[in-house]
Image (spheres, helix red, strand yellow):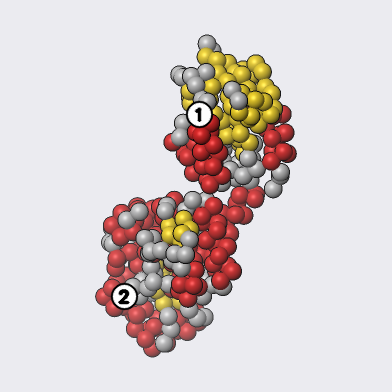
Amino acid sequence: MDSEAEVKAQVISRLRTLLPQLEIEELQADRSFQGSTFDFVARVRIGQVRKTLLGAVRSSGQPRFLRQVIARFREGGIASGDSYFVIAAPYLSLRGMKICRSHKVGCVDLVGNCYLEFDDVYIERIVEEKPKAVKRMIKSLFTPISSRIVRAMLEEPDWVWRLTELVEATGASLGQTYNVSEKLAAEEFARKRAREGVVLIDPAGLLDAWREEYTITAVNQVHSFHSSERDPTRLMAKVKEAAERLGDTYAFTIHAGASLIAPFVRFHDVHFYIASDPDAWVHELDLHAVEFGGNTHLLRPYDDGVFYCLRSPQGMAVVGNVQLYLDLYGYPARGCEQAESLREKEIGY
């Protein structure tokens, strides 16, 4: 990560490019304004409107740093009708921009995202691409072991977790659990309470972030076959019986799983996770190899965490609500509709 001085230099040199809608009449770094010093002060004009932008530059746009800057802005108490606070950073997420907006503070980053709103002026630009460092940080919350911690917290979003409880529930190491809790707090998905533990404060935002990073076929091994049993409910009963004979762990997901929890759409294909090699399942269910398609899909999970919080409606194993939602959301055959129905009826955030 660049130092604050390096970020400031980039912001100063590129501000006219980053805010092309504004005519910047004067721009100075480390400038005093009414007794307070700012990283930059820019006198700008757009149409007949003139404004003085009072800028603070930070090397990170994480929510907790934005709130610290906003608090300092407010403590200074110097904003007037002629001036407007602006925060600049290497990158600002949608969450970060939302925080600035809610406090009536402008923001801009080196990627091209910006938000300014004063007088009759409204400027907003959102760039889809994230810097590689940000992608790595977000993805690091959802790697196999880290996702166990995130999953446990999302399944019980109101619980104040001690780190040792998370270690016991997920099998993650104490160090890994601590690191994930720190990242969750930095992104304001969670709050750490001294001597108590960590609790989610934005489970919906965390689930959304995971959903955007998750693709069922990219992380799991999917083995598709054809079964002569055309009725999916009878096929599911056969899966349950096969699991008992094999002594293996399994769990229904996608529409098969949702049909037992919060049915919303009709379905034909049956998807389920298995804990062992698929060959024994193929034999027990009399499945046949297909080149394309198939109606029976065996998933070898990317991590045993998918079996966390299993339910047994009608005596059949189903993945937890969080895993079910993730698997459904990207499924092409009305998966998104079913996912949102499940979220409304069962997840609740």
Residue under label 1: 77
- 349 displayed left or right of 44: left
Residue under label 2: 312
Local secondary structure at mark 1: loop
Q: Nearer the viewer, residue 327 or 193?
A: 193
- 299 displayed left or right of 173: left
Count of numbered labels shown in the rendering? 2
Please identify the residue farthest to the front as the structure is shown. Answer: 35
Instruction: Tell me: residue 125, above or below residue 136.
Output: above
The residue at 69%/35% (across/down) is 8
Q: Residue 279: which numbered mark, if any? A: none
The residue at 28%/61% (across/down) is 263
Q: Position of residue 59 (x, y in %)?
A: 65, 43
Q: Nearer the viewer, residue 272 or 295?
A: 272
Q: Position of residue 335 (x, y in %)?
A: 38, 56
Structural crowding at the residue carrying mark 1, measured as other residues with C-alpha within 10 Å and reported as few (<14), some (14–19) or many (≥20): few
Give the quadrant of residue 245: bottom left
Instruction: Tell me: residue 269, above or below residue 94.
Output: below
- 65 displayed left or right of 328: right
Please identify the residue farthest to the top as the structure is shown. Answer: 48
- Mark 1–mark 2 distance (CA, rounded to whole Å): 58 Å
The residue at 48%/26% (across/down) is 117
